[in-house]
């Protein structure tokens, strides 16, 4: 059971349409790097996913997508990639009033 006063620290509001457009823009322009050391990378992505922010999901997704193109994904990387993608798809679909498939296509375009 969760106390009412703890709710605001635990649950965040979904993003709105304007924030969704900013998220897609951030996803398109993000040019960060991921660690070449798998354990460091896995820990960093785990922490980002725990924070639960859409921008964190976007950066995990984008970084791991780059590694996927190179063919160097480990099992934990693939799990984080899929989890980040699923979270992004749900956020964008809700914010933009689109289906999950349409949101997935939006992400694929960037």
Image (tube, rainbow, N blue to C red):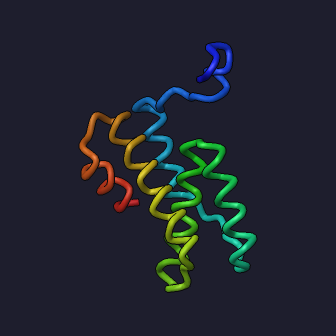
Q: How many marks?
A: 0
**Residue located 35% across and 35% down the image:** 94
Of residue 92 and residue 39, the one placed in the foreground of this image is 39
Is 5 above or below relative to 40?
Answer: above
Residue 20 percent across, percent down from the top left: 44, 39
83 on left or right of 38:
left
Quadrant holding the N terminus: top right
Q: Quadrant of residue 12?
A: top right
Question: Seen from this angle, which residue lies furthest front?
Answer: 1
* Quadrant where the C terminus is found in the figure: bottom left
Classify 74 as above or below 56.
Answer: below
Residue located 67% across and 70% down the image: 34
Outermost residue on the bottom side: it is 71
Camera-side residue of 91 and 24: 91
Q: How far across and how far down the image is residue 6, in percent?
A: 67, 20
Residue at horizontal 26 percent and vertical 40 percent from the top: 98
Residue 13 against residue 48 in the figure, above or below: above
Q: Position of residue 85 (x, y in %)?
A: 44, 57
Q: Residue at x 41, y 53 (%)?
A: 86
């Amino acid at each position: 059971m969760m106390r009412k006063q703890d709710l605001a620290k635990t649950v965040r509001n979904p993003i709105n349409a304007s924030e969704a457009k900013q998220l897609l823009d951030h996803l398109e322009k993000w040019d960060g790097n991921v660690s070449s050391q798998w354990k460091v990378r896995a820990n960093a992505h785990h922490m980002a996913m725990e924070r639960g922010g859409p921008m964190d999901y976007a950066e995990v997704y984008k970084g791991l997508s780059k590694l996927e193109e190179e063919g160097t994904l480990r099992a934990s990387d693939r799990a984080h990639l899929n989890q980040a993608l699923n979270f992004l798809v749900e956020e964008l679909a809700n914010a933009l009033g689109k289906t999950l498939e349409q949101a997935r296509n939006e992400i694929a375009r960037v």
